[in-house]
């Protein structure tokens, strides 16, 4: 069975999660209720971003790959901004996360590396004239080149 990834919807939802979490950490939330939940969401977002990065980098033949990379760039940037806001005490909940700063800083550094990788992939994905070129996936080639069943 083919595993279909709905990049557009998934990335949209993850972006909404980052924005909601960014708003949440600005509040004076009860640490005993929200500490583990916020840490879990940060970990989930990090893993999810890495999953999509691996998926998009493993195959350069995905349809709309460049558009997905652009969306991933924006998502990853929002995630880095969230981590920076926490690590620089710009949000109220940061005081509750002090013990986790080394781990969060490591996540931020890893996502900064992803940002560079996305920039490079976007640069490589542009043709010599600077225009993006879409590539057909192997499955699309099969469909286009298969004999027409009506004939």
Image (tube, rainbow, N blue to C red):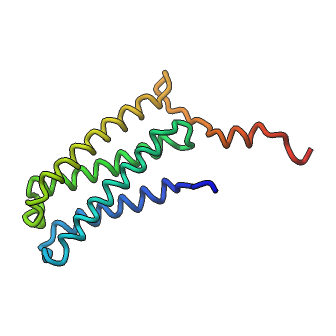
Residue 89 placement (x, y as % from top left)? 8, 57
Identify the residue at image location x=52%, y=36%: 60
Please say if 31 is above or below 15: below
Identify the residue at image location x=55%, y=42%: 62
116 sits left or right of 132 in the view: left
Quarter of the picture containing the C terminus is top right
76 sits left or right of 121 in the view: left
Query: Residue lying farthest top?
Result: 128
Residue 7 placement (x, y as % from top left)? 49, 53
Identify the residue at image location x=49%, y=29%: 131
Residue 137 placement (x, y as % from top left)? 62, 40
Query: Residue lying farthest right?
Result: 151
Please say if 122 is above or below 7: above
Quarter of the picture containing the N terminus is bottom right
Identify the residue at image location x=10%, y=66%: 96
124 sits left or right of 33 in the view: right
Task: Count how many numbered circles sit on residues in the image.
Answer: 0
Query: Residue lying farthest front?
Result: 1
Residue 83 placement (x, y as % from top left)? 20, 54
Question: Residue 46, located in which quarter of the rendered image?
Answer: bottom left
Question: Residue 61, located in which quarter of the rendered image?
Answer: top right
Question: Residue 86, located in which quarter of the rendered image?
Answer: bottom left
């Amino acid at each position: 069975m083919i595993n279909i990834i709905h990049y557009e919807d998934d990335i949209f939802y993850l972006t909404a999660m980052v924005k909601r979490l960014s708003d949440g950490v600005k509040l004076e939330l009860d640490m005993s209720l929200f500490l583990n939940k916020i840490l879990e969401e940060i970990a989930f977002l990090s893993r999810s971003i890495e999953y999509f990065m691996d998926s998009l980098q493993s195959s350069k033949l995905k349809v709309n790959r460049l558009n997905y990379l652009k969306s991933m760039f924006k998502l990853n940037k929002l995630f880095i901004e969230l981590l920076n806001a926490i690590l620089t005490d710009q949000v109220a909940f940061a005081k509750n996360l002090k013990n986790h700063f080394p781990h969060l800083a490591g996540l931020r550094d890893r996502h900064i590396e992803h940002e560079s990788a996305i920039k490079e992939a976007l640069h490589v994905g542009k043709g010599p004239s600077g225009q993006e070129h879409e590539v057909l996936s192997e499955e699309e080639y099969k469909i286009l080149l298969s004999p027409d069943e009506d004939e």
